[in-house]
């Protein structure tokens, strides 16, 4: 059983974040939260989403699991005014998600969660550097790198967070000292990442005010942020690219 009322913008932003790198996902429903975790088909990126009870105007649920086509769900949610409320109710008889908003009622067919791939357990990673910067700076950094290359390195050098991207003819770099960041836990680290994924992640960041990045040496990056005053938590784990000599 699942029945909930939620602000449209909160749900739109949450689904936008998770659908940045995947097309469909399992959702675990409980009495006080909604969880999703999935990996992209290439095993290069994983995303997890947690919507706690505080994100909802009201929520009732018993433990169950559903599968959702995120593209279809996003299309339906896009019809709602961001300041309106969306009512969600799981129909156990038809196995559809009833969505009511602004006088419209949709019945969204669900996917069988047993047919969807389970996200692997993320190993414990030693990512000693932690950088907290504004969502605006994060998006601008990715956009600048995309102009010259399809990959980008991130790291910390002498206590300064940096980004570098090199293409066939052009190069771009950015140094962000501690005074220009919200916070930093420094460590000498550097890793290279695909801009295809980082670009998608930057779109998923959306309205987030702060982005927290954890980095190691040639290790996956952890990129996380909060929405809805902390009641929606999103985390990406992105595998590094192998640098050729």
Image: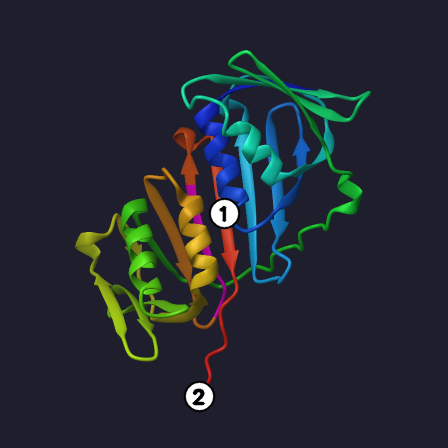
Q: Residues within 10 Å of mark 2 (few under 14, many from 20)?
A: few
Q: x%, y% of residue 70?
A: 60, 39
Q: Is residue 165 above or below residue 83?
A: below
Q: Is residue 220 above or below residue 27?
A: below
Q: How many marks?
A: 2
The residue tagged 2 is: 245
Q: Nearer the viewer, residue 113 or 110?
A: 110
What is the number of the mark on residue 42?
none
The residue tagged 1 is: 235
Choose the circle earlier in sequence order: 1 or 2: 1
Asked if the stretch drawn in magenta spans residue 27, the answer is no
Q: Nearer the viewer, residue 114 or 129?
A: 114
The structure residue drawn at horizontal position 80% and vertical position 23%, both measured from the top left corner, is: 94
Q: Residue furthest right?
A: 93
The structure residue drawn at horizontal position 67% and vertical position 35%, both measured from the top left corner, is: 28
Q: Quadrant of residue 225?
A: top left
Q: Nearer the viewer, residue 53 or 1?
A: 1
Quadrant into which the N terminus falls: top right
Q: Quadrant of residue 151?
A: bottom left
Q: x%, y% of residue 2?
A: 68, 21
Quadrant into which the C terminus falls: bottom left
What secondary structure predominates along the stretch shown in magenta? strand
Q: Residues within 10 Å of mark 1 (few under 14, many from 20)?
A: many
In the image, the segment drawn in magenta is 219-225
Q: Name the front one of labels 1 and 2.
A: 2
The structure residue drawn at horizontal position 52% and vertical position 64%, both measured from the top left corner, is: 239
Q: x%, y% of residue 64?
A: 74, 30
């Amino acid at each position: 059983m699942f029945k909930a009322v939620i602000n449209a913008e909160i749900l739109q932003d949450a689904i936008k974040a998770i659908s940045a790198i995947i097309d469909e996902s399992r959702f675990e429903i409980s009495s006080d939260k909604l969880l999703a975790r999935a990996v992209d088909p290439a095993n290069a990126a994983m995303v997890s989403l947690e919507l706690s009870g505080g994100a909802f105007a009201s929520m009732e649920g018993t433990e169950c699991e559903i599968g959702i086509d995120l593209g279809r769900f996003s299309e339906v949610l896009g019809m709602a005014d961001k300041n309106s409320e969306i009512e969600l109710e799981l129909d156990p008889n038809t196995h559809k998600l009833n969505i009511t908003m602004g006088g419209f009622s949709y019945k969204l067919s669900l996917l069988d969660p047993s047919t969807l791939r389970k996200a692997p357990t993320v190993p414990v990673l030693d990512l000693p550097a932690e950088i907290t910067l504004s969502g605006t700076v994060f998006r601008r950094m990715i956009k600048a790198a995309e102009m010259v290359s399809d990959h980008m390195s991130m790291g910390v050098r002498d206590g300064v967070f940096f980004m570098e991207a090199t293409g066939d003819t052009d190069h771009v770099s950015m140094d962000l000292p501690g005074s220009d960041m919200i916070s930093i836990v420094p460590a000498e680290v550097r890793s290279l990442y695909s801009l295809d994924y980082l670009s998608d992640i930057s779109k998923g960041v959306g309205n987030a005010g702060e982005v927290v990045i954890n980095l190691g040496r040639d290790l996956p990056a952890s990129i996380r942020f909060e929405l809805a005053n902390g009641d929606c938590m999103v985390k990406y784990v992105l595998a590094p690219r192998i640098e050729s000599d």
